[in-house]
Structures are given as C-alpha cells and as structure tokens.
Amino acid sequence: MRILTDDRPSGPPPDVSVVIPVLDGIATLPALLEALRRQRGIGGVEIVAADSGSTDGSRELLAAHPLLLLDVERRAFGHGRTRNAAIAHTSAPYVVLLTQDAVPADDHLLRRLTD
C-alpha cells in the first residue's frame, strides 16, 4: 500500500478518522463525501480512502478532496488486511469503518458512534 495523495487538513488533530475501502464507487462517493463533510457535534474528521484500482473516476474524485488517498494493488486487497493497513495511517482516537456506499442518513452519525 502506498500513499497517492495526502491532502488532509492541517490544524488541530481530528476527533474521528473514517476509513473507506474503494473500488469503482463513483456512483455513491460524492454523496458519502458530502455527508461526511456535513457531520456535526464532533471536532475534525479525517478521511482515509484505500482505492484498489478504480477505473470509473473514483480515484480522481478522491484526489480532489482533503483526505489521505492510499493505493492498494487489486490482487493484494483483503477486507481485513486493507482496513488494518488503512487504520495504521489514521491519527484520531476513534476510527469509523465505512464502505463506499454507506451514506450517513443524517449529520450526527459520527457523534453518536463516538458517544
């Protein structure tokens, strides 16, 4: 796994890191990223996306956002292994694992999970 881009915001450390494995998720990633940006009731949110060879524009979409984008060789992808490797790149005391199509229903999901 290698770092493609690291555009995480500077400033105070985040309260929550969100890890998202991605493969061709362009259909739902915009809504997911917007929903994470709207989260309330917590401090900073750090996003770590682990892309395993998307060819639908997902990688370019992710690279245009303030997050850490990791490259996972498709043949090296493993559900647990990939998530564990991505978690090693987080910096918040709490880590939330999502999938690319798990769009939060409201703006307080991360606060409720960390409470």
Image (cartoon, rainbow, N blue to C red):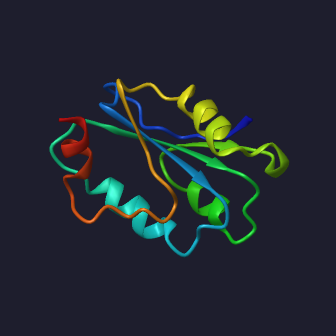
Decide if residue 5 is on the left or right side of residue 32. right
- In this view, 50 is above or below 53: above
Q: Does the rendering let one see residue 89?
A: yes
**x, y percent for residue 26:** 58, 71
How many numbered callouts?
0
Quadrant position of the C terminus in the picture: top left
Residue lying farthest to the bottom in this orientation: 27
Instruction: Find residue 114 and report its image quarter.
Output: top left
**x, y percent for residue 12:** 31, 25
- In this view, 115 is above or below 79: above
**x, y percent for residue 101:** 48, 66
Q: Does the rendering let one see residue 63?
A: no
**x, y percent for residue 104:** 32, 61
Decide if residue 36 is on the left or right side of residue 88. left
Quadrant position of the N terminus in the picture: top right
Instruction: Find residue 31 and report its image quarter.
Output: bottom left
Decide if residue 8 is on the left or right side of residue 13. right
Decide if residue 32 is on the left or right side of residue 61. left
| Nearer the observer, 63 or 93 | 93
Identity of the residue drawn at 34% across and 35% down: 16
Identity of the residue drawn at 26% across and 46% down: 110
- In this view, 13 is above or below 54: above
Identity of the residue drawn at 59% across and 67% down: 25
| Nearer the observer, 81 or 40 | 81
Residue lying farthest to the right in this orientation: 75
